Every structure is written in C-alpha cells, then in structure tokens.
Image (spheres, helix red, strand yellow):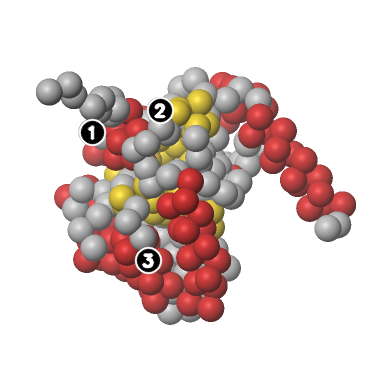
C-alpha cells in the first residue's frame, strides 16, 4: 500500500469515527439500496427501467445546477426525467446545487450550496430532498457535523456495509462501476450483507454500453439487482430503508 492510499485510509477511518449519528439496525435487514449521483439521463432511462422491471425503487441524488448540461458522463438530468422518476416512485435526494466539493470552498459557502440544492428541488417538485450525498464523496470533519445536523441522512463513498449501527451523518456506499467482469465483487458484498443482516448501499452514475469510469453497463446493473433480489435482501430507496430501520421491533405476543 502506498503512502497516498494509506493516508486516504487513515482519513476515512477518522472521518467515520467523529460526529456520528448512529441508527441501530437491529433485525430489520438485510436491505440493499441503489443510488445514482448527479445524475446523467441514462441513470433514469436505463437504470430506472431496470429497477422498475424488478418492482423496486432507487434514490437519485440530483444537483440541479447540472440540469440540461452534458459532460463526460453523458447528457445530464432534464425536467422530464425528474417528473418520470417521481411518477415511478423513485426518490429524489440532494447533492448540492452546483456539485461542489466541500474541500474547495469555505464551510459557509458549502452549506449555502447544500441548502440551495435542497430548496431548488423543493421549488421544482414540491419534494423535500432530505437525504444528501456529498459531491465526489468529499467530506470534512466540520462539514460532517454541520451538514449532518441539517439532513435526514448524508452519504459518502467510503465502502463497506452499514451494519449493527449505520452512521446517518456518513452512510457507507460502494461504487457499482464497470462491466459484468466485476460481478464477483458485488456478489461477495451481497453475501456479507446477508450474513450481517446489514444495509448495503450501491452508487453509480451513467448506465451505458460504454460507460464512463464512473458508471456501469446495463448488464452489470441488471445482474446486480437480480443478485440482490435473489439474495433475500429487501431492495429499498434510502428513504424507504430509513423507514424500515425505524419500524418498531415486533415483540413476541403472549397468547
Ligand atoms: Zn456527484
């Protein structure tokens, strides 16, 4: 392991351990959530269609400042995609307005853009996008504390399973990138999630036959959703998962 990745690991462990907001997972799991960040149109047109074919819903963390633009992930979200995904029952999460990293601006400016992003979604759709994902997965000790207090949940890109207790201020999430040759990795994460009765979150961007380095192929996405369904995990959006984990535990009744 080189120094850079070693420092990255130390930073991830430190950020995971401070200003946490634990959500005990008790026995409601295992649950799997599929998320899309930014989001490129194909996340809805292709990814959303795949989720719909399994009768399940995902979470779209939208940065509305990207609307009607095009970048290396392809065409970005349009109004019609937002309307259709909400009609399908998917969730809109927030992802700042301008897709800015908290490492590049002051905390005050970052917070302002986070609030602007959530407000813009409310103005456009009437939805309160209280679940948030950090652009580029960048998080700092101060942003974790400040933004965590404003949102129902905050998601990063530190991998692994949310188990025993999830940290609502920095949910763990795993990139779902590449093609079907990567499938074994996702299969083992799903097995681990079942064994730990945890909450496994995947995130990706574009879903295309030739995806960017931050996206995956339709075949990999379809196979991973199928594996999740076969594994016995419940597939739920972030909002649905939070509701599942907040359900009171049923006590055995005395008859
Ligand atoms: Zn993003």
x 61%, y 22%: residue: 19
Q: Is ligand 1 within 8 Å of the beta carbon of the residue shown at mark 3?
A: no
Label 2: state its secondary structure. Answer: loop
Q: Residue furthest left?
A: 255
Q: Where the C terminus falls, by quadrant?
A: top left
Q: Which residue is mark 2?
A: 152
How many residues crowd mark 1 within 10 Å: few (<14), some (14–19), many (20+)?
few
x 65%, y 25%: residue: 18
Q: Are marks 2 and 1 in contact (CB under 8 Å)?
A: no
Of callouts 3 and 2, which one flags the residue occurring earlier in the amino acid sequence?
2
Q: What percent of the width, then of the height, locates residue 85?
A: 24, 53
Q: Which residue is mark 1?
A: 126
Q: Nearer the viewer, residue 171 or 88?
A: 171
How many residues crowd mark 2 within 10 Å: few (<14), some (14–19), many (20+)?
some
x 22%, y 66%: residue: 53
Label 3: state its secondary structure. Answer: helix
Q: CA distance from mark 3 to mark 2?
A: 29 Å
Q: CA distance from mark 1 to mark 3?
A: 34 Å
176 horizontally vs 143: left or right: left
Q: What percent of the width, then of the height, locates residue 40?
A: 41, 60
Q: Which residue is mark 3?
A: 227
State which quadrant residue 151 falls in. Answer: top left
x 79%, y 53%: residue: 5
């Amino acid at each position: 392991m080189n120094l850079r990745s070693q420092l990255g690991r130390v930073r991830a462990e430190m950020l995971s351990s401070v200003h946490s907001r634990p959500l005990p997972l008790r026995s409601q799991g295992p649950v799997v959530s599929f998320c899309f960040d930014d989001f490129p149109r194909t996340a809805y047109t292709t990814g959303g269609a795949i989720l719909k074919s399994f009768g399940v819903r995902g979470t779209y963390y939208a940065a509305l400042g990207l609307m009607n633009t095009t970048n290396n992930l392809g065409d970005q979200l349009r109004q019609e995609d937002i309307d259709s995904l909400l009609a399908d029952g998917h969730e809109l999460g927030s992802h700042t307005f301008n897709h800015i990293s908290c490492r590049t601006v002051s905390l005050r400016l970052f917070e302002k853009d986070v609030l602007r992003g959530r407000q813009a979604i409310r103005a456009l759709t009437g939805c309160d996008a209280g679940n948030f994902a950090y652009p580029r997965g960048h998080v700092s000790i101060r942003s974790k504390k400040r933004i965590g207090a404003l949102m129902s949940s905050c998601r990063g890109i530190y991998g692994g399973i949310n188990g025993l207790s999830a940290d609502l201020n920095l949910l763990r999430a795993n990139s779902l990138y590449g093609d079907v040759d990567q499938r074994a990795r996702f299969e083992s994460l799903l097995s681990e999630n079942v064994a730990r009765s945890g909450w496994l979150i995947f995130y990706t961007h574009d879903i295309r036959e030739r995806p960017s380095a931050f996206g995956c192929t339709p075949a990999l996405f379809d196979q991973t959703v199928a594996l999740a369904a076969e594994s016995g995990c419940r597939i739920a959006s972030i909002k649905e998962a939070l509701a599942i984990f907040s359900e009171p535990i049923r006590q055995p009744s005395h008859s």
